Amino acid sequence: MTAGPPRLSGLPGLSRLPRLSKGQGPGGSTMLVAVLVLASAALGLVAAFTVPAGLPYDEPAHWANALYLAEHGALPVLGDPGVGYEGQQAPVFYLAAAGIVRLCGSGETGFAAVRLLGVLGGVVLVWLVARILRRVTPGHPAVIVAGTAFVALNPMLIVMSASVQNDTWALVAGFGALLVAIGGPGAHPWGRGAAIGLLSALAVMVKISIAPLVLGVLVVLLARRRWREALAASVVTALGCGWWVLRNLALYGDLTGQAGVDAAGYHFAAGGTTPFALAREALTYLALPDEYLRNAFSAPVWIDALVVLLGMVIAAGAVALAAVTRGRVRGLPLVFVAVAGIGSVAAWLLQVALGWHVAFRTAYGVLPLAASAFGAVVLWAARPRTQAIVCAALIALLCVLCGWTGVQIAEVAGRISPAL
């Protein structure tokens, strides 16, 4: 296991953590959430300019797609000259990246600009998760702050967002759809459904792996008998991304284009399928970017222990959400978050069972649920002061992981040449 960008131990506001008591309202967490959003932006900038080009897994293939679109003005097709194994991916991110390449060139400036697009996506992602947490646990600022920190100070998410990839913006659009779906009363059903559909279609057109989250939102709408929203969302989603599915069927013979990857001669070794191997990969991708950075460095035992501790915190917080809250968590928003998250993990497990080499980051629809659980562990503490101390300890844990990872990235940057 391993982690993300540098220098977090001096996070502003950590030593002046306010009393985060029940009933204090969202104002008690606003300042610290803003600090966390700014910290994620700063760390993303550091990662974008320090992680060697091409070291993040799949970055060369994503960059090749952007260059192909910028040069040819047409969507890549697997098997054509100059098209890599990501050529079957949905096009929205690559269209934006190709526009940047045409403006800034295909050299270092254009590459850095596309990485910065990902950093921006990471910042928006943190803000969206904070908004979702406020809907799930209103009146509990400690939960909101700790849960937001799980995303904002997460080494893996920081490094991923600061690379050339399409995951982050798919999550932004998908979490936007989730946030609209769990929004408060008063919105027109047809209008809200159309907004959910637009964001869902956009998410799928950035990366199809977000589809389980989209499906989860639609399932909850139907289960709650929100018929008009479900119908509008389904129609708009189908119109927005149905053509892409039909294109995959015509070109490659399946919905996702995976058959085209195999036919083009790209083969990847499947990961372990034992419970231990699956748990290890999930924990790694929820905390550290060592596998994402091609195992250029590895974690010592004490870092592994901290990652296991992080997993235990999430598990304890999940129990707290179910057993300790006693009406302090809004049921419907939590249902949306839980169904989307569980569905995303289930889809990942199914693909692994089918023998596909699929990283756990395809299950990142679980992030709002994981963040909610990470923050909810403070609810085991009865007193507001104790909750604040637990919140500070959780942030400190993330800071240690970030600081250690930053040191590793600095060392790797000194001995690995950029390769794209």
Image (cartoon, grey):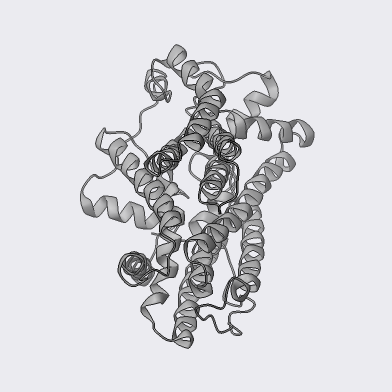
Q: Position of residue 71 (x, y in %)?
A: 69, 22
Residue shown at 47% from the left, 85% from the top: 384
Specify the quadrant that holds the C terminus.
Answer: top right
Q: From the viewer's perspective, is residue 226 above or below residue 46?
A: above
The picture places residue 14, in percent across and down from the top left corner, at 58, 80
Q: Residue 110 at what x, y percent from top left?
A: 72, 39
Q: In the image, residue 321 lies at what x, y percent?
A: 36, 66
Question: On the rendered structure, is 345 left or right of 42?
Answer: left
Left or right of 397, for residue 268: left
Which quarter of the image is occupied by the N terminus?
Answer: bottom left
Please state which of residues 86 and 170 is positioned toward the viewer in this rendering.
Answer: 170
Residue 194 in view, yes or no: yes
- Residue at 46% x, 13% y is 251
Question: Would residue 290 be visible to someone looking at this image?
Answer: no
Between 385 and 75, the one lying in front of the other is 385
Report the label total.
0
Q: Nearer the viewer, residue 141 or 72?
A: 141
On screen, residue 392 versus residue 225, left or right, reads right
Residue with the most extreme right position? 103
As drawn, the residue found furthest toward the left would be 274
